[in-house]
Image (spheres, coloured by chain):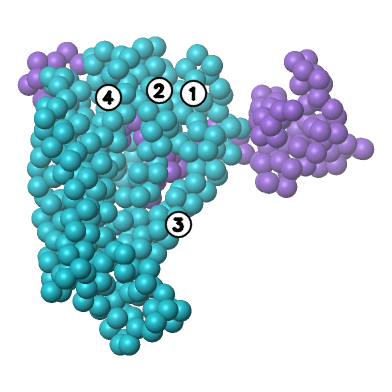
Amino acid sequence: MRRLGELEAEIMDCLWKWGRPATVREVVDDINHRRPVAYTTVMTVATILYNKGWLTREKRGQAWLYTPVRSRAAYSAALMEDALGASQDRSAALVHFVERMTDDEVAALREALRSTGRGEL
Amino acid sequence: MNAAPALFGYAAVVGTLAPGVLVRSRWTQRSPSLAIGVWFALAVTFSLSLSLGALNLAEPGAHLHGLVYSCRAALGLGPSADDTLARAGVAFAVALVVAQLGSFAFHAVQARAARREHREVLDKVGRRSADLDATVVDHAVPAAYCLPGHRPRIVLSTGAVDLLTGAELEAVVEHERAHVLGRHHLVLSLAHALSWAFPGLPLARQLRKQAPLLLEMVADDHALRRFPRTTLATAMFTMASGEAPQGALAAGGQTVLVRLKRVLGPARAAHPMLRCCVGVGALVAPLLPVLLACPAGLG
């Protein structure tokens, strides 16, 4: 059994990819190209995403049409802001490779590298 | 004889003078894991000296074995402690321990919640890269970080993927993997907890400042086991200088500078003899307050 989170990601991926409102049936058909998945499972997870605030929906005939609340780029930008923001308590939650530097710091760094004989960096 | 003055004096030295000495030491950069061990040994020594000092002040002759007895007395379970000073001393010692443990639990849980929230979004937005064993997020600013702990993730932005070569990316991922495998987030939570429990104490302040840097050095060393120094150094420099960001900047540039100089400098760990002495010192330091308190208890 796959994780709930994976199916959530797959549903969001479909809707972002298409860039238009879609029904659960369309999503199920798309996922079924790769692997079998039950209609009711996708419907349940789509409802969860709706309740979590990731999707909006409107009734079209018998079926619900689902739309992402925000674009993938908007979520990515917010995610990176969370990760790279200068928040005080961030260090325990996310561990960075390097912090960003100001122009002055970069200049100082270049100077230091030159003095160690590695100016080609 | 009351050992309280000696214990408090020892705590004062460890809490205020020792950090300065350690910060100025050169060997810490060459053996960062040992340095982290020494920092925490100092923290344990400080707390222990303070607790035992308080107990001794309350009940001259109290020592570690007497702690259980004293607690029972304070709670009114055992033979009652006759004066309020004794109760205050015990209460102080217990409060000290509880404050530190509670603070650690609080910081660890808070960080964990922040990571869970972040991971929830990450898993939908990011794309798994099996080659790199990382999650890649569409974002122009070069970035690399990890979500350590339960269900860890290593995250790269597309900006970083575009900017770095294959080997450099692998070196970055290896560096982040060291954070995850080494449970470095718990060390950071401990450092946070200590600075919360003892605000203004030079030891706690310096530990909070030094621990992140030393952990980065540990992770750098881990990456250097598999990748050449120039690869890691180039990745660091490119990532740190890649794009001028808007808004507030963390004062992290100096950290990168120190790390880069270290990575490119001559490779040598601290002398084994020095490491041995420091290690023994780190083990003995916390025992000293116990020894100080015990003869007083026997006498």
Residue placed under numbered mark 2 in the picture? B173
Q: Marks 2/3: CA distance?
A: 29 Å
Task: Identify the image quadrant of residue A27.
Answer: top right
Q: Which mark is residue B134?
A: 1
Q: In the rendered structure, are the residues bearing label 1 and label 2 in contact, judged by CB atoms less than 8 Å apart?
A: yes
Q: Is residue A14 left or right of residue B133?
A: right
What is the display colour for chain B?
cyan
Which label sits in the foreground, 4 or 2?
4
- Are discs 2 and 3 located on one and the same chain? yes
Q: Marks 4/2: CA distance?
A: 13 Å
**Dot 2 crowding, Cα within 10 Å, few <14, some 14–19, many 20+:** many
Picture coordinates of residue B156, whole percent (x, y): 44, 26
Query: In the figure, B237 relative to B131: above or below?
Result: below
Query: In the figure, B188 relative to B226: above or below?
Result: below
Q: Marks 4/3: CA distance?
A: 30 Å
Task: Identify the image quadrant of residue B163.
Answer: top left
Residue pictured at 81% horizontal, 20% vertical: A36
Q: Tag 2 or tag 4, which sits nearer the N-term?
A: 2
Q: Is residue B143 left or right of residue A16?
A: left
Q: Marks 4/1: CA distance?
A: 20 Å
Amino acid type, mark 4: Asp
If the image is split into quadrants, where does the N terminus of chain B sit?
bottom left
Q: Tag 2 or tag 1, which sits nearer the N-term?
A: 1
Residue placed under numbered mark 3 in the picture? B106
Amino acid type, mark 2: Val
Q: In the rendered structure, are the residues bearing label 1 and label 3 in contact, judged by CB atoms less than 8 Å apart?
A: no
